[in-house]
Amino acid sequence: MTGKPEKSKRRKPRLVSFRIRKSPYFEATERYGCRAYTTYNNMYLPLVYKDLVSDYWHIKKGVTLWDVGCQRQVEITGPDAFNYLQHLTSRNLENFKVGQCKYLPLTTPDGGILNDPVCTRVAENQFWLSIADRDIHLWARGLAAGYQMEVKIQEPDVSPLAIQGPKSFDVAGDLFGDWVRELKYFSFKEVDFQGMPILLARSGWSKQGGYELYLRDCSYGDQLWEIVMEAGKPFNIQPATPSSIERVESGLLNYWEDVTEETNPYEVGLGKFVDLDQEVNFIGKEALKAVKTGGIKRKLVGLKIHSEPLNQLAQPWAVESSGKSVGNITSAVYSPDLDENIAYALVAIECSHEGTQVFVDLDGEKIEATISNLPFIDNREVLWSGIKND
Amino acid sequence: MTGKPEKSKRRKPRLVSFRIRKSPYFEATERYGCRAYTTYNNMYLPLVYKDLVSDYWHIKKGVTLWDVGCQRQVEITGPDAFNYLQHLTSRNLENFKVGQCKYLPLTTPDGGILNDPVCTRVAENQFWLSIADRDIHLWARGLAAGYQMEVKIQEPDVSPLAIQGPKSFDVAGDLFGDWVRELKYFSFKEVDFQGMPILLARSGWSKQGGYELYLRDCSYGDQLWEIVMEAGKPFNIQPATPSSIERVESGLLNYWEDVTEETNPYEVGLGKFVDLDQEVNFIGKEALKAVKTGGIKRKLVGLKIHSEPLNQLAQPWAVESSGKSVGNITSAVYSPDLDENIAYALVAIECSHEGTQVFVDLDGEKIEATISNLPFIDNREVLWSGIKND
C-alpha cells in the first residue's frame, strides 16, 4: 500500500493550484477516481466520483467514505475558553459536556449567522469549531484580541474523514468494535486506532447515519483511508462526497446557500438555538431580541417545484405569488427517491404555510410550486437508533 | 449586446457551485471561452482561456482583459479610518494621499504576513484594501470591535476589471482619453464612464503595464466588459487571466505560495514596508523589532532550476546544499521568454547569495539550481513610463 501515485501520473500538468490546500486524503481521492473538486475553506473538496446520482444512491443505501478534511477546526483553548465560546453563539451552552458535539450558530452583532459549525468539547477548556466554508479563524482571533480573554485560537492538525450511510454502523463496528453502535448521536470518544490518534464522533453531514473520524495527525491520512476502504469491502463501501441531493431531502442547511450573514436564526428554523434569557451578552443578543419582538418577515421553507426534473444547479430564481416576487430559491435539486424537484426558498412569512401555491420563475418560465414542510424525508429513525440496517 | 447566453447553454448541467460567488463578469468570461476556473475569495477566478502559454504571450506582447472581480475590497470608513488602518500594517502611511494606491502588508501579532493587499485611499476617511485570497473582512471586523474605534468595515459593491499588457495604454487612451497615459503608476482617478461609476487606477497584477477599473456598480459588469472588448479590437485584445508565469518573471509575490502567515516582511523582501520608528504600535511591531534585532534566518530568493522545462505545477520541493535541506521551493514555472525554469524559494540565509549552487529535489531527482537575484525580468521601463509600445 503506497500513498503515492506513480511518477508519470504526478508529472501530468494539472490545473491544480498550489495556493489551495490539499487534505491528507487528497492523493487517495485522486487514486480512487474523484472526477472534480470544488474548494472549501481554501482546500480541495471532492465533488463527484461516479456521477452525482450514483453517489447519492450509495449514500442512501450503502456506505460511503468522504474526504471532508476541508471541515477545518478552529480550536479554542485556555482558561476563558468556555466563556469566550458562549459569546460567539446564541445557543446556551451550560449543559455542554466533554464528549459531546453541538450544532451552534455563530452570530454577528446584527443578529445574522456568521457560520454554523458543529462544536466538539474535546476537554474542559478545549473546543473545536468544525466550520462551514469561511475563515472563522480570523474572526475568532480578532475578537479574542478585542475581548482580552485568556484564550488561544488556532487551527490544529485535525482532518475529518466521514463514513456515511446506513451500513456505516457495520463498517465502523468491524473497525473499532461493537461499542461504536451504541455511541449516541453527536457524541464522541477518543481512540488510539492502530497507533493513529482519532476522535471518533457519531455525526456527519447526511442523515443516513455515520461517523466522523477526526484524525489528529495528518501524516496518517493515506493509511487511514486505505484501512477504512479495506474494512468496508464486505459492505461495498465506495468513495463519495457530501450529497447536494440527500442533504436537501433531509433538511440540512448549507452555509452560503440557505444560510448567510443576511439571515438570522429565526428565519431559517434555528430559533431553538437562540437563548435570549441567558446572562451572557453574546454577540447579536440585542439585535435578536428586536427580531423576536418584531417577528420575522420571511422564512426558509421547503418547496416542491412541479416541472420536469431539474438538470441544472439552482439559481436564486424568484418565488412569486399573485404576480409579485415574494422571495427566492436558495437550493433546488431533483430527488430521484421522491421523483420530485425539491427546494428551499426564503419567502415572505404570509406565503410560508404548508400547501401554499406559488410560482417559481425558472429563467422566464413560470412553474407551479407548493410550500412544503421540512424535512422532505424524515430519517430520524436511522439517525438516532444507530442499529437499523437493511 | 446582451449579457445572457442563450437559454440552451444555461440549462446545461455544470459543476458550478451556488456556494461560490460569481463576479459581474462571470457570464462574459464563459461566453468568451474561459476553460477553467479556480476560486479566490470565494468567487470564481478564470484560470485559462486558450492555454497558459498563449495567454502569457498575449499579456507580454499585446493587451488582455482580466476578470479580477474576486479581488474583493475591504472598505474602511469613519472618523478613525486612517488611525485604524495604520494599526493593521507595518508600512508608515503618513504620506498616503487621496488618489494614491499603496501596497501594504497586513501583519499578525507574531510579525507574520496576514495578507498583502493594495490599498486605495478613495477619500480622506475611505480606504479600500484590495485583498489577496483570504477573508480579511472578518479579521478587520473582529479587530475593529476590539479597538472600539469609530470605523465601519464592509465589502462594497466594487468589482475590478483589469486591462493589462503593453498595449493597454492605447486601449485605455481610446476609451477614457489621453490623460490616462499620464496617470502615474499606483494612482487613480474617479470617472463617470458612459454612466458607469468607475475608479480607474494605473495598477494590476502584472508588470506589463495596465489599468484596473474598479467598477462601483455590479449591474454594469457585462456592459463594461463588452465596451472594453470592442475598444480593444484594433489592438487585438484578448481575455486572459493573471499569469502564473509572467508574475514569477516579474518578481510579483503570490499570497499562500511565496508569502504566508509563517513568513515575515523581512524574509520575503518587504522590509522596506516596515517602519519600526513610527509612533503607532501597529500589530506585530514588537515581534518585528525582535526579528530585526536578531536578523533573519531565511530569505525568499530567485532560483534557476537547470532541468528540462517544468510541465507541472510546483510542489514545495526541498532545496538542498551539501546533501542537507536548506529550504523549499514556493513557486516554479518554465519561462518561455527566458527559456529557463525559474522559481522562488525560501532558503537559509547562508545559501541566499546570488550565484550559490544548490540542488532541488524534484520528486527524488536531484536537479542543479542557481540562486538568482529578483526580478528575473526587470520591466520597470514599461511599468513606470506608460508610453512605451511596440
Image (spheres, coloured by chain):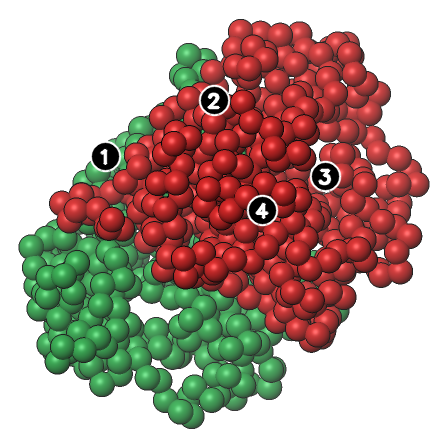
Chain colours: A red, B green
- Using residue B125 as the reference point, say whether residue B158 is left or right of it: left
Residue that numbered label 4 is attached to: A179
Q: CA distance from mark 2 to mark 1?
A: 38 Å
CB within 8 Å, label 4 to label 3: no
Please tell me which of labels 4 and 3 falls first in the chain: 4
> Residue drawn at (59%, 41%), measured in percent from left and top?
A181
Kindly identify the residue that appears in the image at 20 percent across and 71 percent down: B319
Q: Which mark is residue A263?
A: 3
Q: In this rendering, would A347 be left or right of B379?
A: right
Pointer 4 local density, CA inside 10 Å: few below 14, some 14–19, many at least 20: few
Residue on which the image places disc 2 = A57
Q: Judge whether A268 appears above or below B382 on screen.
A: above
Q: Amino acid at mark 2?
A: Trp
Amino acid on which the number 4 mark rests in the picture: Trp
Report in which chain the residue with disc 1 lies. B
Q: Earlier in the sequence, mark 2 or mark 3?
A: 2
> Do tags 4 and 3 sit on the same chain?
yes
Q: Position of residue B137 (x, y in %)?
A: 59, 56
Residue at the (16%, 65%) spot, across then down: B361
Chain on which label 4 sits = A
**Structural crowding at the residue carrying mark 3, measured as other residues with C-alpha within 10 Å and reported as few (<14), some (14–19) or many (≥20):** some
**Cβ atoms under marks 2 and 3 closer than 8 Å:** no
